[in-house]
Image (tube, rainbow, N blue to C red):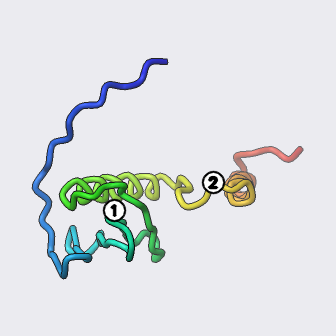
Amino acid sequence: MPKPIALPRKLNSTKADVINSNLVHLRDGEVVLYRRENSGKWQARYKLKNRWQRISTKEKNMDYAAKVACEAYDKARFLAEEDIVITSKKFGAVAKAVTNQLQKELDEGGGKVV
């Protein structure tokens, strides 16, 4: 399968509240950009379902990092609304989610007992 063509990124103006040179709040504080010690790349955190999620933007430029962080936040919010597990891909977590979903279907009379 051919690789997708990489297009140059466009910077969208993202309102950023710069707290200091290593901390930036985006989207009224819903998304936080920060740089960890000994790293030039920006990290991001955002809160979903009362839990902080952390990602690396893999960007050194703050404007690009802000765009990546906001896109990740939007995607995570969409997946959370659709009840798609986004935090762990470990087998135990996936198995538990599937078990809960199947039990819910059984309780509602939609599944069948084997």
Which label is found at residue 74?
none
Q: Residue furthest right?
A: 114
Q: Are marks 1 and 2 in contact (CB under 8 Å)?
A: no
Question: Residue 9 lies in what quarter of the image?
Answer: top left
Mark 2 element type: loop
Q: Residue at x 15, y 75 (%)?
A: 17
Q: Could you tell me how far apart the alpha carbons at marks 1 and 2 are, in whole angstroms?
A: 25 Å
| Pointer 1 local density, CA inside 10 Å: few below 14, some 14–19, many at least 20 | some
Mark 1 sits on what residue? Answer: 41
Question: Residue 10 location in percent, x, y?
Answer: 15, 42
Q: Residue furthest front?
A: 38
Kind of residue sitting beneath label 1: Lys
Camera-nearest label, 1 or 2 = 1
Q: Residue at x 13, y 50 (%)?
A: 12
Answer whether residue 40 is visible to the viewer in this image: yes
Question: Residue 43 lies in what quarter of the image?
Answer: bottom left
Mark 2 sits on what residue? Answer: 89
Answer whether residue 108 is visible to the viewer in this image: no
Mark 1 element type: loop
